[in-house]
Image (cartoon, rainbow, N blue to C red):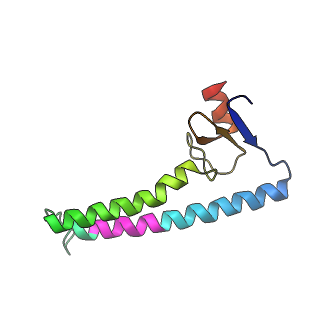
Amino acid sequence: MKNGRTICIKDPKLQKIRNNLRLIILEESSRRKSEIRDQEYAINHDKDGNYVRSSEEDIKGLQELTNKWWEIERPLRASIVKCATCGKSNKNMTYHRKDRTWDCVDCHRKNFG
C-alpha cells in the first residue's frame, strides 16, 4: 500500500495469541485509568458523594491525575493494540503513515479507499 502497511496474521492460533495479548494490555490500562478516575472522584466529592468545589491544591492534584491518565491513553491510541477509528482490538491492522495511526483493515478501507 502506498500510504500504509498492513500486518496480517492468517493462522488462527497466532490470531488468538495476538488477541489475548492485546486484551491483557487493554485490561491493565483500563484498570489503571479506573484507579485514576476513582482518585479524581475522591478529590471532587465528599464522603456522602456530594460535589465539593476544588481548592488550588486540589486543582493541581487533578491536573497531575489527568496527566497520568494521558500517559496511559496517548501511547494506547498510537499503538497497534486497538483501531484508532472503531476501537476494535481483534483484527488485522494497517498503519497509515500520514496520520501515524493504526486502523483495522475495514476502517482503513473505508477511510482511505
Residue 44, position in %: x, y?
Answer: 22, 65
Q: In the rendered image, which quarter is residue 13 located in?
A: bottom right
- Does the magenta segment cover residue 38? yes
Viewport quadrant of the N terminus: top right
User: Residue at 20% of width from left, 67% of height from top?
Assistant: 58
- Does the magenta segment cover residue 6? no
Q: Chief secondary structure of the magenta span?
A: helix
Viewport quadrant of the C terminus: top right
Most extreme residue toward the right, as rendered? 11
Residue 35, position in %: x, y?
Answer: 40, 70
For residue 12, above or below residue 84? below
Q: In the rendered image, which quarter is residue 55 located in?
A: bottom left
Say which of 10 and 76 sits in front: 76
User: Residue at 44% of width from left, 64% of height from top?
Assistant: 33
User: Residue at 55% of width from left, 39% of height from top?
Assistant: 85
Residue 107, position in %: x, y?
Answer: 63, 34
For residue 61, above or below residue 11? below
Say which of 49 and 13 sits in front: 13
Residues drawn in magenta: 32-41
Q: In the rendered image, which quarter is residue 50 located in?
A: bottom left
Most extreme residue toward the top, as rendered? 113
